[in-house]
Amino acid sequence: MDNNILLQFLRGFIKALRVGQHEDLDENLETLRMAQDHLALIYQEYEQEDAPEGAELLRELMMEALHLMFLGIEEVFHYLEDENEEHLSEAVALAEEGNDIMTSIKHAVENNQEWTSSASLG
């Protein structure tokens, strides 16, 4: 699932939860579980392979972004356990931060920019 699509889906689902719309709840939760599984698999691939020389920071940033997106989804599941709305706000914040990192990576790669030590992790 593309990170922008995931973020949009998460925002829409959270908006529906906040107003008490629970139609297709099971289907939406299954989508989120599948997204988490996909994020975890991609993370594991990055974790298992060494980054090409000079791309170590890029690898670390991507892993951080994947982790943040995963945690954002996890916050939705926490909300469903205790209905504390702070989980929903945290879900969006984490997913947005992960999305921002991925968007920055994509932009840099597309523009053939060099990653330097001036970039930083969360």
Image: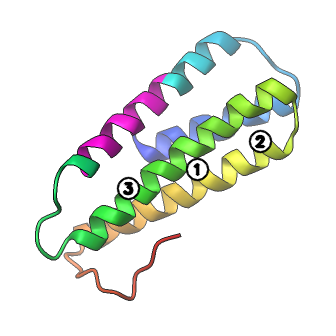
Residue identified by numbered label 3: 63
| Magenta highlight range | 34-46
From the viewer's perspective, is the residue at label 1 or at label 3 nearer?
A: 3
Provide the major secondary structure of the magenta segment: helix
Q: Is residue 71 left or right of residue 38?
A: right
Label number found at residue 34: none
Question: Going from the N terminus, do you reach mark 2 or mark 1 first?
Answer: 2
Residue identified by numbered label 2: 88
Q: Residue furthest front?
A: 48
Q: Residue at x 53, y 69 (%)?
A: 122
x and y percentages locating residue 12 in the rendered image: 68, 35
Element under disc 3: helix
Question: Going from the N terminus, do you reach mark 1 or mark 3 first?
Answer: 3
How many numbered circles are shown? 3
Q: How is the image coloured?
A: rainbow
Which is more toward the observer, 5 or 84?
Answer: 84
Element under disc 1: helix
Identity, as a three-letter code, of the amino acid under mark 3: Met
Q: Residues within 10 Å of mark 1 (few under 14, many from 20)?
A: many
Residue identified by numbered label 1: 95
Identity, as a three-letter code, of the amino acid under mark 1: Ala
Element under disc 2: helix
Is the residue 77 above or below the residue 113 in the image?
Answer: above
Q: Is residue 108 left or right of residue 103?
A: left
x and y percentages locating residue 44 in the rendered image: 30, 42
Identity, as a three-letter code, of the amino acid under mark 2: Leu
Q: Is residue 85 left or right of residue 31?
A: right
x and y percentages locating residue 72 in the rendered image: 61, 44
Is the residue 81 above or below the residue 93 in the image?
Answer: above
Is the residue 35 above or below the residue 51 in the image?
Answer: above
Q: Residue at x 40, y 68 (%)?
A: 104
